[in-house]
Image (cartoon, rainbow, N blue to C red):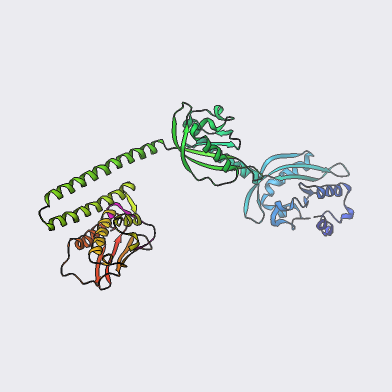
Amino acid sequence: MAHLIGSFDWQETSLGPISDWPHCLRSSVDILLGARVQIVLFWGPQFVAIYNDTYAPTIGDKHPHALGRPAQEYWAELWSDLEPLLTRVMKTGGTVSAKDRPFYIERGRGPETVYFDISYSPVHGEDGAVAGVFCIVNETTELRHAQETERRLAAIIASSDDAILSANLDMTIESWNKGAERLYGYKAEEAVGHSVLMLIPDDRRDEEYDLFRRVGLGEHVAPYETQRRRRDGTLLDVSLTVSPIYDVSGEIVGASKIARDVTAKKQFERFQAMAMGELKHRVKNVLATVTAIARQTFVNSDDEREAVRTFDERLASLARAHDVLTNGNWEEADLRTVIDTALLPYSPDRFRIEGPAINVAAHTVTALTLAFHELATNAVKYGALSRAGGVVSIGWLPSPDASRLTLEWKEQGGPEVVTPSKRGFGSKLIERLLASELQGEVRLEFVPSGLVCNVNAYLAKEKEV
């Protein structure tokens, strides 16, 4: 700025050439150029602007054009606000100051409201009259926005139902919201300044030490479920989210912890697991009873004994489907798991299974399990699994919108396949059950190189209309 001021054509301004400037003006310019704070000097009746390097960025694209020009030209958008302040100093000879004073300004980034700490002081001329206004300013816009953000966050934390606390790396609690009071039973004044270990069950203290060690090292800590101890000594299940706290230099100085009470959820999960276990037990008992009745009823001939064996195997397949559903809470299951479970009785090296991870609905699990059982049984008797070296390839793909599923069972390396003259129960079960339960199309192709079963079905529980 010293170079700009020295080379500026002041002859064309009301100030005249620098050589004619009064001592008070030259001294004021020397002071502002040597200062490391934001200073602008408005001189004379027109308030001609002279400012330093530190001030220049605060006026954006007004610089350098505003230098040496009357203030009203380049501060036009805020002149109705600025002019009374400058005039007051000129007329009264007093200082005008304010903290976080708002100004509307346009400086190349569009209209904006900015904030400044200001101190406008008079500069007296040789005759003792006020000749100019010496303005020391400090823009606080970013600080104010940061404080507003901090206040909003503090309000959110204070009103949150979740228990939120912060602690330094020495594990000393430094903040404690109302949610923490409700969850843990301690008032803020009873918790702040004390160790977080007051909340940790004795058998989980090593877990807490390791947590703060990891936070201090900058490691990511994924949300997890654990237990905490209330003031009355009772234990509760919580879901915990932990984040590092940084100081102004970017160093990690502590951790914030958000805890949500999941006691009711954990109790329900335990009840659900117990209920599922009981259901699984009862289903197996029913299937065992049905098997026993079948064995006692059909025992008179080899054909009947073979029918009982086939019936036993189908019931066992159905039981395996129930096991898969029990592990998935009777809602859905992973397709690969369904296929692996259905084919458990057979050697895995005889199968080539490939497809993306995808879940199928409960009713689909039972249908697929029974269908794969029938296909595998047929392959053992007549198809690829009846000969050494024969293999079965199983593959699937969802549609781009994930609404449909295409699946293929393809046998290779078995005896030459001939289209049967009539369809047995297994074929009917595959075509009719799968088509019905999957709300799609099932096609069995008896090609000479091996049986191929193609399935095209909806993934949704119910077909969309």
User: Is residue 124 located in the magenta-colored stretch of the structure?
Assistant: no
Q: Is residue 123 left or right of residue 410?
A: right
Which x, y percent locates residue 203? 48, 33
Q: Quadrant of the N terminus?
A: bottom right
Query: In this view of the protein, can residue 397 be seen by the observer?
Result: no
Compared with 439, 243 (above or below) is above
Q: Which sits in the foreground, 50 or 372?
A: 372
Which x, y percent locates residue 137? 73, 45
* Residue farthest to the left, as pictured: 300
Q: Which sits in the foreground, 377 or 239?
A: 377
Which x, y percent locates residue 413? 30, 70
Which x, y percent locates residue 118? 72, 42
Which residues are the magenta region?
351-364
Compared with 227, 33 (above or below) is below
Query: In this view of the protein, can residue 331 be seen by the observer?
Result: yes
Residue in the image at 22% along x and 62% along y: 431
Residue 283 falls in image quadrant = top left
Residue 341 falls in image quadrant = bottom left
Q: Is residue 100 left or right of residue 35?
A: left
Q: Which sits in the foreground, 207 or 462?
A: 207
Residue in the image at 87% along x and 55% along y: 18
User: Is residue 360 located in the magenta-colored stretch of the structure?
Assistant: yes
Number of callouts in the render?
0
Q: Quadrant of the C terminus?
A: bottom left
